Amino acid sequence: MQRFINDPDEVVEDTVKGFVKAHADLVRRAENPRVIVARQAPVKGKVGVITGGGSGHEPAFIGYTGVNMLDAVAVGELFSSPTAKSFLDAAREANGGRGVVCLYGNYAGDNMNVKMAIKLAAKEGIEIATVVANDDVCSAGPLERAKRRGVAGEIFMWKCGAAKAAQGASLEEVRATAQKAIDNCRSVGVGLGPCTLPAVGHPNFVIEPGTMEVGIGHHGEPGVRVEPLKSAKEIAADMAATVLDDHALPPGTEVAVLLSGLGATPLDELYILNDTMAEAIEARGLKIYRTYVGNYFTSLEMVGATLTVLALDDELKQLLDVEVHCPAMR
Amino acid sequence: MQQLVNAASGEIVLALAQIVIENRAYLSEIDGKIGDGDHGVNMAKGFGLAADRIKGHTLTLAEAFDTLGTVLMTEIGGSMGPLYGVMFTNFAEVIDKAEAIDASAFGAMLRKGIEGIQSIGSAEVGDKTLLDTLVPAVDAFEAACAARRPFSEALDQLCAAAEAGRDSTKDMVAKIGRASRLGERSRGVLDAGATSCALILTTLAHNVQRRLQ
């Protein structure tokens, strides 16, 4: 596969440099080169909202830095957690004096580095509260939700948490709202083709031609089953069923839908999927309040898509409506 | 009673860095079989950075451990940065004030390292991680001390148990970290973290043995 890279070991550095040049109106680079900060941050008297994660998921995580969105983001190497220092520096940059909430995904490295950053931040008087995203339905059973990985549902968690913070809420209120948002999210991924870390040089897993992997994770974590490739209609119906069976929402519930490509799936195919997904969701008596279709949370050049369904209440609906200015989302 | 002088023993950490750097390709190769193949690269980067900062300074073992731990923790990221980072900073904490380190202080230092790792990670022995090397090695060291064996002999026990622990990971199924997603497919290969941990512990033990007074 042909790619636009310079030095495989400099992919993250080069990405961040180009990103900051493209979005200088919204973001800046902190003194720590692995931290991206919203132009206006820190906002005095506002709870700081941060995240962090491995690179290779662009526009996540850095693309969600902006106004009424994330104040700062810690940047890791490709598919590898940022350092505790970067999480700490992100918290410092975001700290407006009312504490910082770190909204991140459930991965071993991130859990450890955030935990250490919390200790380091406490020493300098910055309180960090956390919410750990676990929306990926296929990564563990319903009785083991705490073990599930975080995927594209993180975007709704950031959106609702950051909007709440922008309204002047306390650290505990922001944390509780972000927790509610991720608790109300369920996601599933389907992979049609693998991805390659440039420094490794070969795909880090295999999807045989003519097959697809249902329940695949954001780094190629194995899914629940490998099946012959089906039509978009069948795949979309299956993805919607996987998410909604786990969700068990009462008819009449309003939902937000986020359908993200994994990096190498063209937009037309996402719209083809969405056509059936919308029908399948409405067939359960649910009302679609808003739909996002695009490359919101990718995995290098993986072929595939994730579906996320967020169950809304009045508060989450209103927070979803708050206007944002960030590179990845309107 | 055998003991190690803390002052000027910081050079031991340079020996640790050297062995990790020499095994850079080997560790990445093992990791590549069931992980993402960057263990050797990341470890060599972290230990190399620490060595650069230690070289040319006369440091106590505690100071050198603290430098190494801080570099790993703050500049490496992933899972191994914080895990080894907290292990070495905890080592440093225990022996910080000691002029000489006897077997009992050395054992307390190792134990505190395990506690640090367990305070941030959730792995247990048998999960196919570096704990499968570290825990039996420290247990063996403590058992030898309890049996009133000399410091040097207890370090031999530590090395033997570390290597046996490393080898035990070959037949384990990973229960944590990226390899755990492979389930049964993770059986049959050594765990990269357990392998680097055995290298670190045996190199540490041999260098301490040479300096015992």
Image (cartoon, coloured by chain):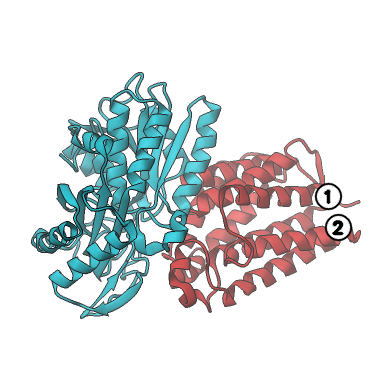
Chain colours: A cyan, B red
At label 2, which amino acid type do we have?
Answer: Cys
In depth, the one of A240 and B171 nearer the eye is: A240
Q: Earlier in the sequence, mark 1 or mark 2?
A: 1
Please state the total of marks drawn on the protein image. 2
At label 1, which amino acid type do we have?
Answer: Ser
Provide residue A326's location: percent of width, then percent of height.
Answer: 20, 37
Q: Chain of mark 2?
A: B
Where does label 2 land, which residue? Answer: B145
Q: CA distance from mark 1 to mark 2?
A: 7 Å
Residue B2 appears left or right of B201: right
The quarter of the picture where the C terminus of chain A appears is: top left
Residue at image coords 8%, 61%: A268
Instruction: Determine whether label 1 and label 2 are within 8 Å by CB.
Output: yes
Picture quadrant of residue A196: bottom left
The quarter of the picture where the N terminus of chain A appears is: bottom left
Q: Chain of mark 1?
A: B
Disc number placed over residue B104 in the picture, else none:
1
Provide residue A183's location: percent of width, then percent of height.
Answer: 36, 47
